[in-house]
Image (tube, coloured by chain):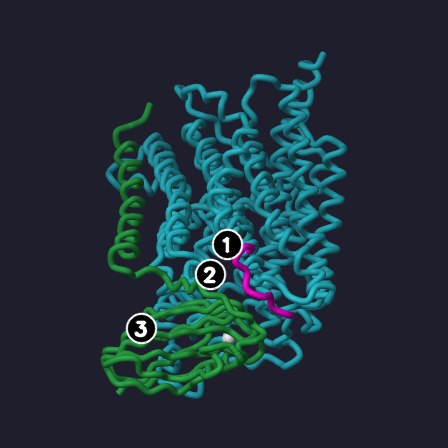
């Protein structure tokens, strides 16, 4: 009943999907490129008094390695206008003080949701100098289009 | 006696077309659907012009209000009313007329949905529900917005139960027979409509007491997960509706036969079973979900690609066979033998072609790493305008050129057909401008759901502006398309010449193998569906409830 070309097509389709699976698995499990999945929780109404978010800022934790402790709230990132040297690896530790926000740095693969009650973690290495635009990509209210800041890599 | 009666009904159906009362249901549903297209399309144009920086929207009707209403009208009203109106006509046609009880349920459902929409739209217009169609807590709209949503869901359920009663009645009277294929599609769609909207119903019932203030805080991630168990299912319901026209109607219109009946039914079953967990890919970059759960969901989302790839084969096989029978030759030359000048073919055909990049984009979004690159950028909106805006909507347009005259007992004139061809081409051009520009600028990092902004003249943001201009161009073309399409529907419903239009259903091939009876056991399909939903959702929901952070109070940020 099944024609030869139909069998070929179904085999190719199945192979294509399995290929995507294997590549995703390899990236996630072997290369450690899994998606941002911060698992810690926090009281969203007590962000300002909970460490480390009681002191948001940029902290150097090693040679070319920084931690940015950041809160997101309508309609800003705290801290903003970050400066780091070229070649730095930055570990962002983020949470929201109010509604759901999304953080994205144009021109990089850094993109994550930041939801109240959770601590989101994502790491990005900035090899090229320049000014990077960091913006909120989840609608969060009337000033959503103003929610942006920059990361200057020198 | 029973046989004679049925036969008589068959004959009257053939001779007189659809029963007047059944036709009225579909006509009314179509009027609502295309009114929603007109208003929602206009709001879309306003948005496109704003996003390109060409138009400033007034404070009393801002970009986010427009966007909320645009989404609700097009993704919910247009599609839901079209689907239900279409499948009720299909059941009336293929199952020998609607039962009086079922007809009544369709009307009650209609009333509940309209009441619900009015209740949801008024707070949007008053700027008390500018929460987008995803209404993620802890953003909190006026309670009336959510109460409206409850009525919409109840109305949809009413129509789904009506369909189940209609189908069960037919099966009781036609033991041992296969449900006619178009009603088989209807069954799949209504099963998904019911089970897919259960999670959002739970979510909304949880939000209402919180938005009123009876409970203080809400579990944000639980609500978000329940939303997406519903949200993506909905998109695939419209897709399954479009598939019904591709598999059943288009072969008849081009003068061919249907592809394997067994395969068609298998594709429907697979889509019904696998759809609900498919929505999880919206949460790939969310916190609170482990990487291994996300990886399992990549698998569950990608699996939906398989029946789609089967469909691609089936459709092109039907096209080639039919064209060759008409004397088509060569590897590609047979393409010319297809009736390109017939809007009833052209529109769904372009819809199918658009699904090639659309489906590929779906695979991209299901995959962890690619998803992270495009998540919440305009790329996603481009994908959506390809799959829903082009694939689904153009198929619906194509259906309207025979469905509307079928229910209004009129005929499609060559003039309206020509207008339809022009509309289809304008729509295709408009959506191409829009979707290609959105995909591209999304890759460059332009976010979605944001009104016009240059982020204080940031150089990166300014470099996106030329691409955004295409949104204005696309939106303008689409508005022309909307006006022409609405004109055609009104004409076909009230002014076209009287006459008989058939409900086109292609026959299976002469040498077709017998369809196995297991395809008829919907009970088993539902059990499998629930099993897959459990596989996909038990772990994350247990995690979200068991390890829940303190909840969030309501915020109004607009
Ligand atoms: Cu934000």
Compared to residue B166, the image places residue B282 above or below, namely below
- The chain under label 3 reads A
Q: Residue at x 62, y 71 (%)?
A: B65
Image: magenta residue range: B545-553
- The residue wearing badge 2 is B288
Compared to residue B18, the image places residue B227 above or below, namely below
- The residue wearing badge 1 is B543
The answer to whether one can see residue B393 in this image is: no
Which chain identifier belongs to the cyan chain? Answer: B
What is the quadrant of the N terminus of chain A in the image? top left
Would the CB of label 1 be found within 8 Å of ligand 1? no
- The residue wearing badge 3 is A124
Secondary element at tag 3: strand
* Cα distance in 3D space between marks 2 and 1: 8 Å
Chain A, colour shown: green
Q: Count the labels in the image.
A: 3
């Amino acid at each position: 009943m099944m024609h030869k070309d139909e069998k070929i097509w179904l085999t190719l389709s199945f192979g294509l999907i399995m290929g995507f699976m294997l590549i995703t698995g390899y990236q996630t499990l072997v290369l450690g490129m899994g998606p941002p999945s911060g698992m810690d929780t926090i009281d969203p109404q007590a962000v300002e008094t909970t460490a480390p978010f009681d002191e948001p800022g940029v902290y150097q934790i090693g040679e070319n390695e920084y931690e940015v402790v950041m809160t997101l709230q309508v309609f800003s990132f705290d801290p903003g206008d970050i400066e780091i040297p070229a070649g730095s690896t930055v570990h962002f530790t983020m949470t929201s003080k109010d509604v759901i926000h999304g953080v994205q740095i144009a021109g990089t693969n850094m993109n994550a949701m930041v939801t109240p009650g959770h601590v989101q973690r994502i790491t990005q290495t900035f090899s090229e100098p320049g000014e990077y635009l960091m913006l909120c990509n989840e609608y969060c209210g009337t000033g959503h289009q103003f929610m942006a800041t920059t990361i200057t890599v020198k | 006696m029973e046989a004679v009666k049925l036969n008589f009904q068959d004959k009257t159906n053939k001779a007189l077309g659809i029963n007047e009362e059944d036709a009225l249901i579909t006509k009314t549903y179509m009027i609502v659907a295309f009114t929603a297209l007109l208003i929602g399309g206009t709001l879309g144009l306003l948005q496109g012009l704003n996003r390109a920086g060409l138009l400033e929207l007034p404070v009393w009707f801002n970009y986010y209000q427009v966007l909320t209403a645009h989404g609700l009208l097009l993704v919910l009203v247009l599609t839901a009313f079209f689907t239900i109106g279409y499948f009720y006509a299909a059941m009336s046609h293929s199952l020998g007329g609607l039962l009086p009880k079922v007809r009544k349920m369709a009307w009650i459902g209609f009333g509940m949905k309209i009441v619900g929409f009015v209740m949801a739209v008024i707070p949007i217009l008053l700027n008390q529900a500018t929460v987008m169609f995803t209404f993620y807590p802890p953003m909190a709209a006026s309670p009336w917005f959510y109460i409206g949503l409850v009525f919409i869901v109840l109305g949809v359920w009413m129509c789904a139960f009506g369909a189940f009663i209609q189908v069960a009645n037919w099966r009781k009277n036609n033991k041992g027979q296969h449900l006619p294929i178009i009603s088989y599609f209807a069954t799949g769609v209504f099963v998904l409509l019911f089970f897919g909207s259960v999670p959002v119903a739970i979510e909304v019932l949880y939000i209402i007491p919180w938005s009123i203030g009876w409970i203080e805080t809400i579990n944000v991630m639980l609500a978000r997960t329940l939303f997406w168990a519903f949200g993506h299912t909905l998109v695939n319901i419209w897709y399954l509706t479009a598939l019904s026209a591709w598999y059943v109607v288009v072969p008849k219109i081009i003068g061919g036969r249907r592809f394997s009946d067994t395969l068609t039914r298998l594709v429907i079953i697979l889509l019904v079973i696998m759809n609900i967990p498919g929505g999880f890919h919206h949460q790939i970059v969310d916190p609170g979900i482990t990487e291994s759960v996300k990886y399992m969901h990549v698998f569950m989302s990608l699996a939906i690609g398989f029946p789609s790839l089967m469909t691609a084969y089936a459709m092109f096989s039907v096209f080639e066979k039919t064209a060759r029978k008409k004397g088509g030759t060569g590897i590609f030359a047979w393409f010319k033998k297809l009736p390109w000048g017939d809007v009833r073919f052209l529109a769904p055909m372009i819809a199918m072609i658009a699904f090639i990049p659309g489906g590929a984009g779906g695979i991209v979004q299901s995959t962890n790493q690619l998803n992270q690159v495009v998540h919440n950028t305009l790329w996603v909106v481009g994908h959506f305008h390809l799959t829903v805006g082009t694939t689904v909507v153009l198929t619906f347009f194509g259906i309207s050129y025979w469905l509307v005259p079928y229910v209004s007992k009129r005929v499609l004139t060559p003039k309206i057909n020509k207008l339809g061809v022009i509309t289809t081409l304008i729509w295709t051009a408009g959506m191409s401008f829009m979707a290609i520009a959105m995909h591209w600028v999304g890759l460059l990092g332009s976010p979605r759901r944001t009104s016009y902004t240059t982020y204080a003249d940031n150089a990166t943001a300014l470099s996106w502006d030329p691409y955004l201009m295409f949104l204005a161009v696309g939106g303008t073309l689409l508005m022309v398309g909307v006006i022409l399409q609405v004109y055609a529907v009104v004409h076909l419903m009230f002014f076209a010449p009287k006459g008989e239009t058939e409900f086109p259903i292609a026959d299976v091939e002469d040498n077709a193998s017998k369809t196995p009876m297991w395809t008829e056991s919907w009970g088993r399909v539902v059990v499998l569906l629930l099993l897959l939903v459990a596989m996909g959702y038990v772990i994350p929901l247990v995690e979200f409830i068991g390890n829940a952070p303190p909840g969030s109070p309501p915020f109004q940020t607009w």
